Amino acid sequence: PLFCKQRLVLFLILIISYNFIIYLLISQKSNYKKKVNSSTLSSHPLGPFWNLRLEDSALWNQLQHTWDRQHNPILRGNLTGMQRSPKGQPFTENCMSQKCSVPSVNDFNSMPEQIRAFIKSMHCRKYPLLINQPGMCQRNNDTTRVGSPMLLIAIKSQVGNFENRQAIRETWGRSGRVRGEFNTKGGLVRTVFLLGRQDSSTGPYPDLNNLLELENEKYGDILQWDFRDTFFNLTLKDLLLWSWFKQYCPTAAFVFKGDDDVFVRTDALLSYLHKKVEEHKLWRIYTNETDMNLFVGDVISNAMPNREPSMKYYIPESFYKGVYPPYAGGGGVVYSGSLALRLREVSERVRLFPIDDVYLGMCLNRLGLSPVHHPGFLTFDLPATDRNNPCAYRSVLLVHRRNPKEMLTLWKQLQNLPAQC
Ligand SMILES: *[C@@H]1O[C@H](CO)[C@@H](O)[C@H](O)[C@H]1NC(C)=O
Ligand SMILES: *[C@@H]1O[C@H](CO)[C@@H](O)[C@H](O)[C@H]1NC(C)=O
Ligand SMILES: *[C@@H]1O[C@H](CO)[C@@H](O)[C@H](O)[C@H]1NC(C)=O
Ligand SMILES: *[C@@H]1O[C@H](CO)[C@@H](O)[C@H](O)[C@H]1NC(C)=O
Ligand SMILES: CC(=O)N[C@H]1CO[C@H](CO)[C@@H](O)[C@@H]1O
């Protein structure tokens, strides 16, 4: 009978622990649901983007697979932090001083020039700054109060686009205190322009370096790195911006990153961001989450790589296989400063991809996040009949594309928006 009793106790213990496990599973699940419902935290995409199976006929997939294995906590046995590869793998090496191995790929010679150039340099991520603004986020010669920026506006530009930059400075990208929509609470805005190097290797260009220097003396808002400013090198601007952000501007609450041919209603954007901050504060009471994971734009889901060799966005199958993760395309995105820091970290585990929007989607995906769609980001512009009607811009945050003259006109028109609409 004693033996029998012991068995009974054992049996009971088993039942109890079984129930406990079930309870754990369920509570985990409902936790997850709560997160999905938060408007600042987006749900994880349904389709698998990180393919665990190796696509060994595509170069990017192959290279990523190696990194995934190196960082796999089960294979490597540690979850803490972002470790460097034990073998000193060139994660972020500076290729200006070291020679990089160029990965081999079968049909390399039949690929278009730009993808070949990309493959040759895709190990390089660190390029020296030629023009820096170390004090950008500490400056407070404003008459108003001191503080870190509410919004850092970072605009991808090219050396020759003086007119675009000036139009942005004079309109929606003005640095300083900016009011919110309809004179509501605004915030401190800082604007920087992200440039690479334009020289004979990018095509025949007149030497504009002296002009650029003068421009920078006058406005002090240029960041220039020492790499060729080409379409497939645009991803570098995101990576280098994140590093710069970490070093010089880590307390900025939000980052807007966009092109120099978009128009942003900065006041409306600030109001929108204030709303998000309030929501996050409420959310924090329940979750104790301090970091705000906001990433907003015009979201494209289930996009496939372009396989048409004559197109600007062409990606050969021997380079990348699979669908793209959800990403925010076209013109500009906004994300929180804390997310910028996390993106910088996770990017060390994601191989460079030639299309910058897609690369951001890949990094977000790696963090278990997806971009949030906002209908105010108009990649494809308003209907032609509405473009000259200021009231049509009421719910717009960003519109693509506007040349410098159009920016100035639109800016003027939108000044007295509330009275008219
Ligand atoms: C994981 O790494 C941390 C710091 O790098 C170390 O202290 C810890 O012991 C490691 N844990 C395991 C299980 O290896
Ligand atoms: C801020 O003001 C100080 C003196 O008041 C001046 O030396 C400095 O150059 C100014 N900085 C900027 C960025 O204008
Ligand atoms: C990117 O810049 C680097 C450094 O200037 C250059 O070697 C490489 O060819 C560029 N890549 C593309 C795709 O233009
Ligand atoms: C909330 O977060 C703080 C700081 O991260 C931590 O010390 C504290 O234990 C957390 N409280 C709860 C209830 O999770
Ligand atoms: C913050 C948020 O988006 N909350 C939503 C959660 O889901 C319920 C019902 O699906 C909505 O009513 C809330 O607005």
Image (spheres, grey):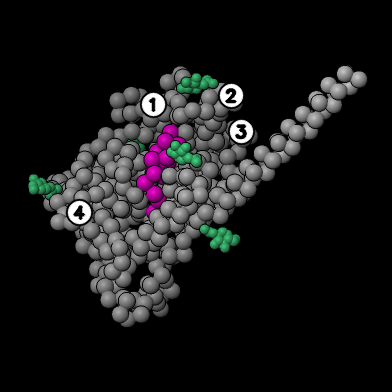
Residue designated by label 3: 54
In this picture, is 8 found above or below 58?
above
Check if mark 1's residue and mark 3's residue have beta carbons within 8 Å: no
N-terminal label among 1 and 3: 3
Quarter holding residue 9 = top right
Q: Amino acid at mark 1?
A: Cys
Q: Quadrant of residue 171?
A: bottom left
Query: Mark 3 to mark 2: distance in Å?
Result: 16 Å
User: Distance of mark 4 from mark 2, alpha carbons?
Assistant: 51 Å
The mark that comes first in sequence, 4 or 3, is 3
Query: Which residue was labeled with disc 4?
Result: 145
Left or right? Give the position of 214 relative to 3.
left
Q: Given this view, does label 4 or label 3 mark the residue nearer the observer?
A: 4
Tell me the residue that label 2 is attached to.
75
Note whether residue 135 is visible.
yes
Secondary-structure class at tag 3: loop
Mark in front: 4 vs 2 = 4
Task: Kindly identify the amino acid type of the residue bearing the numbered disc 3.
Answer: Leu
Q: Residue at x 47, y 45 (%)?
A: 288
